[in-house]
Amino acid sequence: DARAAVASYERALNMLGTQDLHLTADAQFALAQALVAVSRANLPRAIDLARSARDAFAGDATAALPRRIEAWQAANNPRKSATRRARL
């Protein structure tokens, strides 16, 4: 369940710290996704986590995670969602 995932990813982030920036970025993005699965009210924190995860790969054009994060951010952008709802 998403709440259990949030707790697990929070623990993982605490243990990882800054030892491995890419593993930390993976955990941050997973936590961001789990937070939104729990509640859209968690979106601001989730977006911050996703942004931090994407930034960990700055300058690495071969990494797939930043592209996945950007796609997730586009799908979860509250401004785009509001624009989409207004068109309907």
Image (cartoon, rainbow, N blue to C red):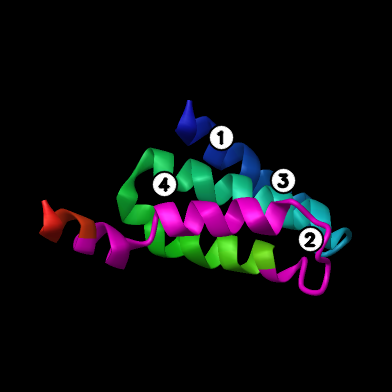
Seen at 38% across and 54% down, the residue is 42
Q: Do we see residue 13 in this rendering?
A: no
**Going from the N terminus, do you reach mark 1 or mark 2 first?**
1
Seen at 52% across and 67% down, the residue is 48
Is 5 in the magenta? no
Q: Which residue lies furthest to the front in this view?
A: 87
**Callout 4: few (<14), some (14-19), or many (20+) C-alpha neighbours within 10 Å?**
some
Seen at 64% across and 68% down, the residue is 52
**Going from the N terminus, do you reach mark 2 or mark 4 first?**
2
Query: Picture coordinates of residue 64 (x, y %)?
Result: 74, 51
Query: Picture coordinates of residue 43 (x, y %)?
Result: 39, 57
Q: Mark 1 highlights which residue?
A: 5
Q: What amino acid is found at the position of numbered circle 4 in the picture?
A: Val
**Callout 2: few (<14), some (14-19), or many (20+) C-alpha neighbours within 10 Å?**
few
Q: What amino acid is found at the position of numbered circle 2 in the picture?
A: Gly
Q: What element carries label 2?
A: loop
**Up-down relation of residue 8 to residue 25 (above or below):** above
**Going from the N terminus, do you reach mark 3 or mark 1 first?**
1
Q: Mark 4 highlights which residue?
A: 36
Q: What amino acid is found at the position of numbered circle 3 in the picture?
A: Ala
